[in-house]
Image (cartoon, helix red, strand yellow):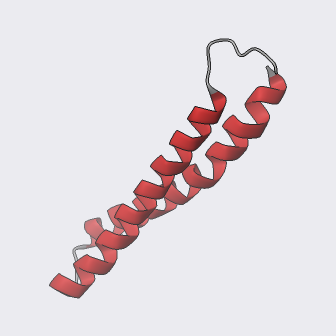
Amino acid sequence: MAHYSGRDYPEMAKTGFFLGLALFVVGAGSELVGHAVFGSLPQWENTLFFALTMIGFAIGFASPFVFGIVMPLIE
């Protein structure tokens, strides 16, 4: 096994994935619950929940590739 320079890449990949998953679940869940409970939401809330969902999706998919594959290879 290679020695890392003080970075725990597998832990960073897992943390990034679960952070992305949490953002995705909060964004999508809040949008669904908000529409079910309150009917129509203000536009800024729709934008916020959509942004949370997309950012969570991007972080959740990018973290395992960046910290699990790319970073250990270029170190």
Residue 13 is situated, as x and y percent measured from the top left of the image, at 61, 39
In the rendered view, does 13 fall on the left or right side of 72?
left
On screen, residue 50 above or below 65 = below
The C terminus sits in image quarter: top right
In the rendered view, does 36 fall on the left or right side of 25?
left
On screen, residue 12 above or below 32 = above
At 34% from the left and 72% from the top, the residue drawn is 29
Seen from the viewer's position, the closer of residues 21 and 1 is 1
Residue 63 is situated, as x and y percent measured from the top left of the image, at 62, 44
In the rendered view, does 46 fall on the left or right side of 52?
left
Residue 49 is situated, as x and y percent measured from the top left of the image, at 35, 65
At 72% from the left and 45% from the top, the residue drawn is 65
On screen, residue 53 above or below 17 = below
On screen, residue 8 above or below 38 = above
At 41% from the left and 56% from the top, the residue drawn is 23
Task: Determine the image quadrant of residue 74.
Answer: top right
